[in-house]
Image: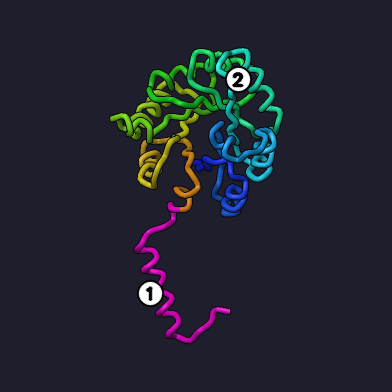
């Protein structure tokens, strides 16, 4: 499963990209607004830091404007993925962008039916919001699993990008449900390698090694 960072904080992306474990980045208007910088400038800088897909979201809601904004964003860098909302106009824009060989990420997906429509429109990614589904009484992991089953059954090329992940358990559930990728806030990304037994075991190994008085080099 590919792991994306869900942030527009360039300094954080630069730091975590050094791990070699960041496959891409997702942004949205809210995250860009927090940066206080021009959108194109932020996206271009992120694209230089991470070679994988970088989702940049349109702000328009009508078809013509979404298409125009999408084409503009795609011109910022070759690894930009244009993010559009899962609406009728968004799906029309997705189809038009796909016909132009521009990659898309259809966001705000909350049902299998919506995911089916996104795939038929030619979306590169579809982003089901696991955390928000859980918040409203559903089971986000089941949504991911159901979309995976439908996509596999009908051989859709659209990748399932699990979004709105709040903690490590969500990452585990997304992976087990068959998500192609998951996008995580930086704090969740950092927490994935943490476990108290790992820390305890390392402390013991170091203490035992110190007793030998040896040095490897």
Q: Does 203 sit above or below residue 213?
A: above
Q: Does 92 sit above or below residue 150?
A: above
Q: Position of residue 12 (x, y in %)?
A: 58, 49
Q: Is residue 206 left or right of residue 96?
A: left
Inspect the magenta stretch and tell me whether residue 167 lies in it: no
What whole-number distance in Å separates the C-alpha atoms at marks 1 and 2?
A: 55 Å
Crowdedness near tag 2: few (<14), some (14–19) or many (≥20) residues, C-alpha within 10 Å: some
Badge 2 marks a residue whose secondary structure is helix
Q: Which mark is residue 204?
A: 1
Residue 19 placement: quadrant: bottom right
CB atoms of marks 1 and 2 within 8 Å: no
Residue 162 placement: quadrant: top left
Residue 58 placement: quadrant: top right
Camera-nearest residue between 181 and 164: 164
Q: Which residue position holds label 2?
A: 98
Q: Position of residue 140 (x, y in %)?
A: 35, 33
Q: Magenta residues, as a range? A: 191-217
- The residue lying at 31 percent from left, 32 percent from top is 139
Q: Which mark is residue 116?
A: none
- The residue lying at 52 percent from left, 16 percent from top is 91
Crowdedness near tag 1: few (<14), some (14–19) or many (≥20) residues, C-alpha within 10 Å: few
């Amino acid at each position: 499963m590919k792991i994306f960072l869900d942030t527009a904080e360039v300094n954080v992306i630069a730091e975590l990209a050094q791990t070699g474990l960041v496959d891409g980045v997702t942004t949205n208007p809210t995250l860009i607004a927090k940066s206080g910088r021009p959108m194109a400038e932020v996206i271009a800088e992120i694209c230089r830091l991470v070679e994988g897909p970088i989702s940049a979201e349109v702000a328009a809601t009508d078809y013509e404007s979404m298409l125009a904004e999408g084409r503009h964003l795609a011109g910022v860098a070759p690894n930009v993925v244009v993010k559009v909302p899962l609406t009728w106009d968004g799906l029309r824009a997705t189809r038009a962008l796909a016909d132009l060989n521009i990659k898309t990420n259809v966001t705000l997906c909350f049902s299998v039916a919506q995911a089916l429509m996104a795939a038929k429109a030619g979306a590169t990614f579809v982003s089901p919001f696991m955390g928000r589904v859980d918040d409203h009484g559903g089971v986000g992991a089941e949504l991911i699993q159901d979309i995976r089953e439908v996509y596999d059954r009908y051989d859709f090329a659209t990748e399932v990008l699990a979004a709105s992940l709040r903690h490590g358990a969500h990452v585990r559930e997304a992976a087990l449900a068959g998500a192609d990728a998951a996008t995580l806030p930086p704090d969740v990304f950092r927490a994935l390698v943490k476990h108290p037994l790992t820390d305890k075991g390392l402390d013991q190994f170091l203490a035992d090694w110190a007793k030998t008085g040896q040095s490897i080099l």
